[in-house]
Image (cartoon, helix red, strand yellow):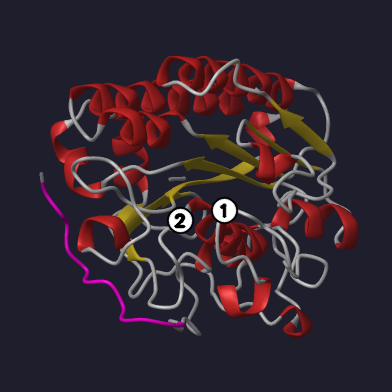
Amino acid sequence: MNTATDTARVLVIGIDGVRLDLLPALDTPHLDGIARAGFLAPVQVDDETPTMSGPCWTTIVTGVGVAKHGVWANRFDGNRLDLFPDFTTRLAAECGRRTFAVGGWAPLFLARQGGPLFVAPTRLGYVAPREDTPEAWEEVDERVTADAEHLLGLDEELHAGFVYLGAVDETAHFLGCGEEYRRSIEAADRRLGRLLAAVRDRPGHAAEQWTIIVVTDHGHRDEGGHGGRSELERTAWIAASGPGLPPGAVPPALHHTDVAAHVYTALGIPPDPHWTLDGAAFHSPHRRHVGGNPPERRKLTADH
């Protein structure tokens, strides 16, 4: 990929716990638009990684698997994030890029439960839920989206950001994967639309080349819940569009570690071999799959 470093930008939106098999029946026009412009494809959580948010999100944003980053559960104690930082921290500390991360699950953003996962982006935002209910988490995601809109709208050099939306996962834990869960996924898509609009409305957007990545960490059982090895729990997905990602060209053997690797590549930063990333850019000629069996290239149909 030959994206110029002075115009390249990346936004990663993490939506927790979205089942791939339900998406075709739901009203998700913004996610569908990204899929049409690039791809949306399944990811299998590998055999070594628990189907829990802590390990999966750490793999997604660091680009390395559990054996390296050391996060095996929803407590982050004993992690090795000093050696394998998230991409917003590494870009800010080592590459001179301006980054942000914002969301509402405490160990991702605060020194709680062994966290934070996002150690030192240029800007960090956290929104605390008023209580642990699906309704309160929808409010959190509204405020997180508003904060991200504000950050994206600032007239400054912004290179990469991560937005975490957690209400879908919380709804499944409380209510299962029924109608309320489906409505929460559709609400998350509307928030995705607001974030895409904020990108388009940036003062310097005409001179910028944006890569958009949307990713989920794991699935859910019908009754709500995850952490096991069932197909519903292990099946996640990645959607992406932007420079170097032709419409309909689905990368083979996608893995969660590929997200961070693609962020660096999209910004014109060849990953340093000393980073020992386990993933590769989505259309890299050197793609490889680490851990578990590669996912099938097919469209699937209809705690933390």
Q: Examine the image and state in which quarter residue 210 appears.
A: top right
- Give coordinates of residue 276: x percent, y percent: 69, 82
Q: Examine the image and state in which quarter residue 121 appears.
A: top right
Magenta stretch bounds: 290-301
Name the residue tied to disc 1: 74
The answer to which of 104 and 133 lies nearer the viewer is 133
The answer to which of 288 and 140 lies nearer the viewer is 140
At a point 22% along the width and 56% down the height, the residue shown is: 232
Disc 2: CA contacts within 10 A as few (<14), some (14-19) or many (>=20): many
At a point 37% along the width and 51% down the height, the residue shown is: 38
Relative horizontal placement of residue 167, taking residue 230 as reference (left or right)? right
- Give coordinates of residue 129: x percent, y percent: 60, 21
Give the Cα separation between the discs numbered 2 and 1: 7 Å
Q: Under tag 1, what secondary structure?
A: loop
Q: Under tag 2, what secondary structure?
A: loop
Disc 1: CA contacts within 10 A as few (<14), some (14-19) or many (>=20): some
Q: Examine the image and state in which quarter residue 254 appears.
A: bottom left
The answer to which of 277 and 223 lies nearer the viewer is 223
Name the residue tied to disc 2: 52
Would you place residue 296 above or below residue 207 in this image? below
Q: Reading the chain from its start, which is encountered first: label 2 or label 1?
A: 2
On whether residue 299 falls in the magenta region, the answer is yes
Kind of residue at badge 1: Asn
Q: In this view of the protein, can residue 206 be seen by the observer? A: yes
Kind of residue at badge 2: Met
The answer to which of 243 and 139 lies nearer the viewer is 139
Relative horizontal placement of residue 76, taking residue 180 as reference (left or right)? right
Q: Are marks 2 and 1 in contact (CB under 8 Å)?
A: yes
- Give coordinates of residue 219: x percent, y percent: 31, 50
